[in-house]
Amino acid sequence: MNEPGRSDGLNRPISEIKAELFKALAHPARIRVLELLAEGERPVGEIQPLVGIEASHLSQQLGVLRRAGLVVTRKAGSSVFYAIRDPLLVELLAVAKRMLINSLSETEDLLADLRAR
């Protein structure tokens, strides 16, 4: 039984919680949104053309990010602004980018070796 005030999430294995984080990141549109928000807070109307998906689809993807606790919202008049909740997420995205660059660099080296033979 849970202690009073204790979230169910605290009783789950950390690997399960991490997997949920990565599931929330596992969509190209969500990654693109987060890359845009890494530059700073943006209104939905500005995000949509930059991500290049329909407004209804963007709304669904933003909902996933919101429910995962990765973004926060602020309403100003009729506009809704989104921002990254934790700056560590920006670092995570940067590390993922560096990992991909390293992987692609290794592939380039392999291709160069194959071409040279």
Image (cartoon, rainbow, N blue to C red):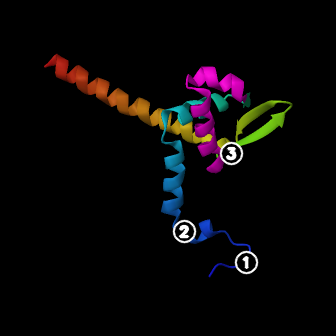
Q: Position of residue 17 (x, y in %)?
A: 54, 59
Task: Spot the residue most to the front.
Answer: 56
Q: Position of residue 31 (x, y in %)?
A: 54, 35
The residue beneath circle 3 is 86
Q: Is residue 44 magenta?
A: yes
Q: Nearer the viewer, residue 60 or 111?
A: 60
Q: Please identify, in this view, whether the residue under mark 2 or under mark 3 is nearer the observer.
A: 2
Secondary structure of the residue carrying tag 2 is loop
In the image, the segment drawn in magenta is 43-69
Instruction: Examine the residues drawn in magenta and state their main secondary structure.
Output: helix
Q: Residues within 10 Å of mark 1 (few under 14, many from 20)?
A: few
The residue beneath circle 1 is 4
Q: Position of residue 5 (x, y in %)?
A: 74, 73
Residue drawn at x 69%, y 79% as measured from the top left:
3
Residue drawn at x 66%, y 68% as measured from the top left:
7
Task: Spot the residue most to the right.
Answer: 77
Query: Dots 1 and 2: beta carbons under 8 Å?
Result: no
Q: Is residue 40 magenta?
A: no
Q: Residues within 10 Å of mark 3 (few under 14, many from 20)?
A: few
Residue drawn at x 62%, y 82% as measured from the top left:
1
- Label placed on residue 12: 2
Instruction: Identify residue type, mark 3.
Output: Asp
Instruction: Identify residue type, mark 2.
Output: Arg
Instruction: Identify residue type, mark 1.
Output: Pro
Q: Please identify, in this view, whether the residue under mark 3 or under mark 1 is nearer the observer.
A: 1
Mark 1 vs mark 2: which is more N-terminal?
1
